[in-house]
Amino acid sequence: MVNNNNDGHTQDPAIKPRRMSFPFQQMKAHNFFDDNSLKSSFVAALSATFPPGEGEFINSVRNYQDQITDPKLKEQIRGFVTQEAHHSHQHKQANIAISKLGWDAKRLEVSLQAEIEKYFHRRSNRFRLAMTVGMEHLTAILAEHVLENPYKIEPMEPAARQLLYWHSVEEIEHKAVAFDVYMQCEGDQKYLRRALRIGFFLFALRISIYMMAMMWWAKKWPTWSEAKSFYSFLFSKEEGFMTALKKPYKDYFQPGFHPWQHANQHLIDKWKKELYNPECDKGSDQYVKPEESSSKLETHAA
């Protein structure tokens, strides 16, 4: 839902870092998402990008931290950094588990980290932050779609599914932080739009290459049935993942856009009530250490 009031950012929720841990050792199937090699390699490719990507997001915002004087935004930056660091750590653990299943996400994670250090760190702070703002928009609209339609990832192994639910909630909570830092310190939204076009192209290209690389390394190729199911998952007119993202993606290019014009705070409450599992939350008295977890995770609705 889009709030056309440009002051929609006054509705932003508290940024609450949560210390989560997931029993990735329970993941046993090579095709851990819907018994489909394309869907599984797609999620594996996404996960491979998160630890290096989240680290770059943190660094690009920190480059401007000393220029921020607004106490609220400074507090939000601290929450953003903590959340992103937790995401990076949990996806590193997920990538180890996914690699053991035959999708070498860890190899791709290491490769991307080297690329970022070689090519991104030499770029201007402005460029790095603008790319972060664009990628934060992409992750936020992906997160919104996941939480609006949790059934779409229901056929995923529970540990990976719970990871994505939690990651999605926190992406929504901090989705405007990098944007607000950029607008306070740089302020050129035309540059942001150019950066998102570049970022989206590179992101889509990278995910495609990563999927092909993992299939080549695993010597596993999709069946025609898997290909049809994956195409429908992404592009079907009624329910396609990418189809549903077209409009919120385009909103970014509207004059005066702000992330909180997509008023989706209700999804945070939805996660708490319908999708949250306290066994994965170190802050819960129901937390179960992953190594002590003996049964498959199930969602515990509040």
Image: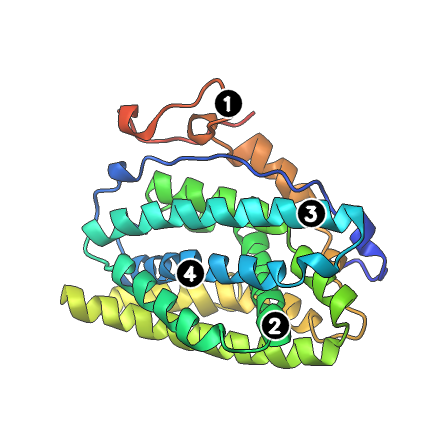
Q: Quadrant of residue 162?
A: top left
Q: CA gap, disc 3 to disc 2?
A: 20 Å
The amino acid type, in three-letter code, at marker 1 is Ser
What residue is drawn where x is 81% and y is 70%?
256
Q: How is the image coloured?
A: rainbow
296, 170: nearer the viewer: 170
Read off the residue under disc 4.
52
The amino acid type, in three-letter code, at marker 2 is Asn
Q: CA gap, disc 3 to disc 1?
A: 23 Å
Read off the residue under disc 2.
125
Q: CA gap, disc 1 to disc 2?
A: 39 Å
What residue is drawn where x is 40% and y is 60%?
46
Q: Which quadrant is the N terminus positioned in?
A: bottom right
Of the residues under marks 2 and 4, which one precedes in the sequence? 4
Of the residues under marks 3 and 4, which one precedes in the sequence? 4
Depth check, mark 2 against mark 4: the one in front is 2
Relative placement, left or right, of 235 versus 170 is left
Read off the residue under disc 1.
284
Spot occupied by residue 212 in the image (x, y as percentages of width and height): 27, 72
The secondary element bearing badge 4 is classed as helix
What residue is drawn where x is 52% and y is 50%?
84
Depth check, mark 1 against mark 4: the one in front is 4
Read off the residue under disc 3.
76
Q: In which quarter of the image is residue 9?
A: bottom right
Q: CA gap, disc 3 to disc 4?
A: 21 Å
Name of the residue lying farthest toward the top: 285
Of the residues under marks 3 and 2, which one precedes in the sequence? 3
